[in-house]
Image: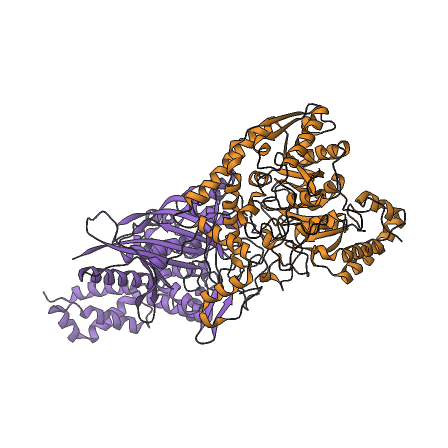
Amino acid sequence: MSFELVVGMEVHAQLKTGSKLFCACGTAFASSPNIETCPVCLGYPGVLPVLNRRAVELLCKTALALNCQINKTSVFARKNYFYPDLPKGYQISQYELPLAENGWLYVESGPGKSKKIRIRRIHLEEDTGKLLHESGSGSLLDLNRAGIPLMEIVTEPDIHSSDEAYSYISQLRSIFRYLDVSDGNMEEGNMRCEPNISINKKAEKTLGTKVELKNLNSFRSVVRGIEYEYKRQSNALCNGEELYQETRGWDEKKQKSFVMRRKEDAHDYRYFPEPDLPPLVLSENFVAEQAKSLPELPACRAERFKNDFGLSSYDAGELTRDREIADYFEEVIVFAQKKQKNCKLAANWILNVLLGSVKEAKISLTNYHIRPADLRELLTYLEEGKISSKIAKDIYEKMHKKKQKAGDVIKAEGIIQVSDTSQLLDLVEEVLCNHPGELQKFFSGKERVIAFFVGQVMKATKGKANPGVVNKLLRAAIEKRRPS
Amino acid sequence: MSKPSSPMNIENIHQDFNNGVLTVESLAEGVISHYEKNSHLNCFIHFDKAAILRHANKLDIQLKEYSHAGKELPPLFGIPVAIKDNLHVQSEPTTCGSHILKDFTAPFDATVVKNLKLAGALICGKTNMDEFAMGGSTENSLAGPAKNPHNTEYVAGGSSGGSAICVSSQITPVAIGTDTGGSIRQPASYTGCIGFKPSYGSVSRFGLVAFGSSLDQAGPFAGNVADLRRVFSVISKKENPCKDMTHQFDFEDLLHAQAGLKSNKITSFEGVKVAIPSNFKSEAIDKDIRENLAEVARFLESQGARVESISIPILDYALAAYYIIATAEASSNLSRYDGIRFGYRKDDDSGGLLQSYFTTRSAGFGEEVIRRILLGTFVLSSGYYDAYYNRAMLIRKEMEREFAKIYAEYPIILTPTTPGVAFKLQECIDDPLKMYLNDICTIFVNLIGCCGVSIPTGRDSVHNLPIGIQFCSKRFWDPMLLDFCQLFEKTYAKAGLIQVGAGQE
């Protein structure tokens, strides 16, 4: 029996505001537990929430970028349950009337195929504190995180593969970073993904029993978790076992999911409208301002890269994943005058060389010492044929490790590539004369011997010869010697 | 330096300060000695003599500076104000009458208290109240029951019983209470002083320990309307930056808004339309009180007002709607009392987290509070939300619409404050519904967020206990309501503070 996988994704992202959602406590990383707290976020008697305007702006921007309709009037609600990391005994969230609804995002659903994932709603809510469970001696409570603004984004159950899920969360993350609304980092906890997973017999209309999966701390875990659940649920149904609507946790070590909570034990949240906050009313002006401030979004930028610069979908996608990288790329090619092969060259160098060395240096692209102008300088030499790509790589190493500039290295070491045919012709003749055996091999069909000849010329020029030119000259010279 | 002139009101006290015949210290000493003589009334949970005198001395230094410079005194300078124990006074205990907060110290000043301090007030103690403001008798308190100064076998009313007692027995000239379903107006009526619940959203709730968030408002008790008005203008001031998003207007804003209205200034009763809901003319109201009300109505008519009886059917649902909404909000507001970050914790970790919650909360909360939390949880729970909470909210919306129409025609609504006079201690303690029924006249005011004042208008014939009547006006028409009450107090002989009988200072 084969089943169809149905996934709806819930993503919580911490918003990059200076202060918490309902009080003036800071949101930056705190060095000790419980220092970014005040009576409001501690839930002391007599306190009241005051809404953070910036949080509303950031959520609004995100919602617009995700094509949502903004509800000009939205209502806050109390989600009631008891747990030590929830100081007031309720979380201020939004329930019946969220800030935004009915948006969408296109994801990759196979090579060259894209699919629309519908976004049901986006709303604002406050984060809880953190509990550290120490075996034996109890649990420790840190409330620095309590009250930090969260954006919750919920999709319809439109995701049908773990790849689509990956594409979805990865695009979402890109958008967050483009808009600078959230760092979108799962490992740091500022982006949390909870897939709701069920399976259907193909063509069945009703949805299967769904399972909510929590505790996933990386994009990879999300993929693995979804795949695990698909297998587990499929096996269960094949064996005639019952599936339960439950919340399961992901065990990263064991690479398995385990039951956390069954439906019967689920909380009754007793949602009701928050009486301490009037309905949030946004003016046309406010929404228009957020719309105006939107930058070119990743999907659009990738399209533009494909159309204007002739890049492949893959390259365009990779370059636009992060706004920083896309900006860097556009600066590097600014003088490329839309020469597509130069754009392709720049793309390759950035994706295959630069980003690797940035990662190795454990630094951000913005702080990396090789600036777009520096890379452009190097690539210009390459484009003009003055150096070979192998030499370019060597020069790059020096730029990376010794912080030298390309031009300086080239001048110092005199490594301008030799393309001068007269110079090379002599060498070519010399090499062919010195290796009659190999020449014979070539004539008897072993065409690959030409690589050996090229190598010999390169060796003689200490790598400075332009391999393309050498190849042409060799072939011509060989043909001249061909026995008739 | 002697006692202030009688009756003790702000104008007289300030006059005495300015004439150099009274110091803040001697006034404070008077408060202390008067309280000590009346300590059996049990109106305070917390009363720190030394701190009060220290503060009084500081104020006396300022007083010298003010008189020296010939400067006008701040509006409440040196005036003793008693504060209900659910409003934070920084560094002093806030117990809300509950064991679960018996050792809790206020981390900041409530906005109301901050405003009072800025106006130079002398904060005198935290007054006794029903636990978490849930009650109508000030019997449900960790400090024990408070007693009616007119007859100590009777309750003082609640939940702001302590504050009402302070003013009624003239321990302090003014006091602050809070009103969610009548908790200022009812005790004012039972003890024979004046109590005012301002419009919802005109006084900040920051620092007021929440019971029913959409219903709670802090407000003043006083012996006369001028003092009531002065305290309201001080406590309603807006804080910057904003700490309460439901605090929409302050007194200055309201005055300003009403300055343009033609019909807002009440200098005579001529032509003023007053409505009496016919619901409150029935046998549910004591005979003496009905007669008292009729007398007031006749007086107003004699002064040119047009007093009309109107039927308001939806009022019949007010009590039920209130007890659903208030308890729902309370069940949520009181979830934070779990013994984990502050407050009482019954140390018993043996049963795990859930058991710890059960043990602490069962031990820390009194019976009435537990009753209301359970009821509130029930009406919000899955399967019952629509039938109860949602329906109550719809009734509330309907009431707002209905009263908008009524207030469009009648600027003043007149009702008894309570269906009966004060009852005996313990009389309603085993019958919560009987206790709840005492709220029928006051509760609609909280549901629709409008303003209401209770003014004493006589005594009943059986027990000689005070009777109060209630004037209400449209939401945010507080200045106009206060004008009306001031005029009524001036012209109706029986209106005003009912002095506690002879034999007490």
Residue farthest to the left, as pictured: A484
Chain B appears what colour?
orange
Q: Examine the rendering and report whether any part of residue A334 can be seen.
A: no
Q: Where is residue A349 in the image (x, y as percent from the top left)?
A: 36, 61
Residue farthest to the front, as pictured: B462
Left or right of B489 in this view: B72? right
Q: Position of residue A156 (x, y in %)?
A: 33, 48
Front position in the image: A44 or B133: B133
A430 relative to A43, above or below: below
Left or right of B440 in this view: B45? right
Front position in the image: A328 or A344: A328
Front position in the image: B294 or A136: B294
Colouring method of the image = by chain
**Residue A1, quarter of the rendered image:** bottom left
B384 relative to B89, above or below: above
Left or right of B278 in this view: B31? right
**Residue A458, quarter of the rendered image:** bottom left
Q: Where is residue A293 in the image (x, y as percent from the top left)?
A: 48, 45
Residue located 50% across and 48% down the image: A274
Left or right of B38 in this view: B182? left
Chain A appears what colour?
purple
